[in-house]
Image (cartoon, rainbow, N blue to C red):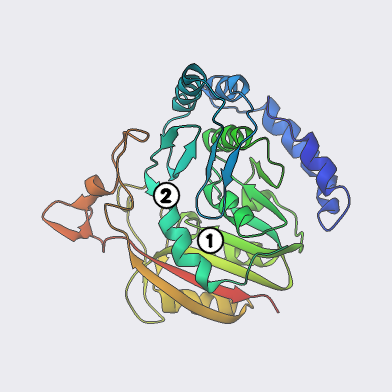
Amino acid sequence: MINFGHFYQQIAQGPLANWLEVLPAQMAAWQRDNLHGDFKLWENAVDHLPQPVPEQLDLRHSVSADNSNLTERQRDGIEKLLRNLMPWRKGPFSLYGTQIDTEWRSDWKWQRVLPHITPLTDRLVLDVGCGSGYHMWRMVGAGARFVVGIEPMQLFVCQFEAVRKLLGNDQRAHCLPLGIEQLPELKAFDSVFSMGVLYHRRSPLDHLLQLKNQLVSGGELILETLVIEGDDHDVLVPGERYAQMRNVWFIPSAAALKNWLEKCGFIDVRIVDHAITHTDEQRRTHWMTRDSLAEFLDPDDPRKTVEGYPAPLRAVLVASKP
């Protein structure tokens, strides 16, 4: 069973202590209500994983762990249990001989983001919509003191717990099954990441303000999201679907998004990266066997989605809270 007790102990003293006024009740409600029908299967997979002590551990250049003392039978058992947690979307991971080739090459995104941000050394970090936690471990590898992720999708929370267990039960990162709207105004984090979230929010400016309310004065927001080409007034409002996704509400140009951030009170706003999403970065694999980007693009014109909208373009913006 996923237990948040150690996390509570870690934050009892320090800038996140006030969170304990509401968090235990939220976690108790989550464990009591509305669990996914497959949650027990996922939880059992995590519970049955061994907890080896990594001889080799790399979080700086990858998320990988190994121990030469594991038998082939133990390695096969690890892979079988991790396959019970499919589909794996964010990664990749290399764990005791199991290569989890995820849908997204999240390491490529990290390589685009990392050169442009304030070094994470000794920083308290929040990752909003953290998924399986791949980027959280890379944040730890980049020197973060403590990383908190929030992720409402229960499968992804279980994937995070599985990886954490195989990394030796590393307590430098924690994933909580929450959405950003469930967080109080903590004003405690040195760095806040929101990557691949903004276009899923019905009210994007409210999302930006929620992110701002988690930062200390002088803290840094790292925002990565879908954008379109255009000037500072251009915003795409898709119909029922965008690239087969139902819950896409607003896709601004990077220039318009810069304006949104400044309107929300952020300063030193910079557009630091633009990148077209290619089918070698997001694709179907043996660990994610459902349709992926290749099926979401117009087969006759890959510059468009199947709905006729501009194909995915992503930008990274960095901003500071006064």
Say if mark 1 contacts mark 2, CB within 8 Å.
no
Decide which of 240, 109 is in the foreground and name it.
109
Q: Secondary structure at mark 1?
A: loop
| Residue at (59, 66) in percent of width and height | 208
Q: Earlier in the sequence, mark 1 or mark 2?
A: 1
Above or below, 137 against 188 in this view is above
Left or right side of 310 for 265:
right
**Residue, disc 1:** 203
Above or below, 312 against 94 in this view is below
**Residue, disc 2:** 247
Q: Residue furthest top?
A: 73
Which picture quadrant has residue 216? bottom right
Q: Residues within 10 Å of mark 1 (few under 14, many from 20)?
A: few
Question: From the image, which quarter does the C terminus lie in?
Answer: bottom right
Q: In the image, residue 31 lies at what x, y percent?
A: 69, 28
Q: CA separation, marks 1 and 2? A: 12 Å
Which picture quadrant has residue 284? top left
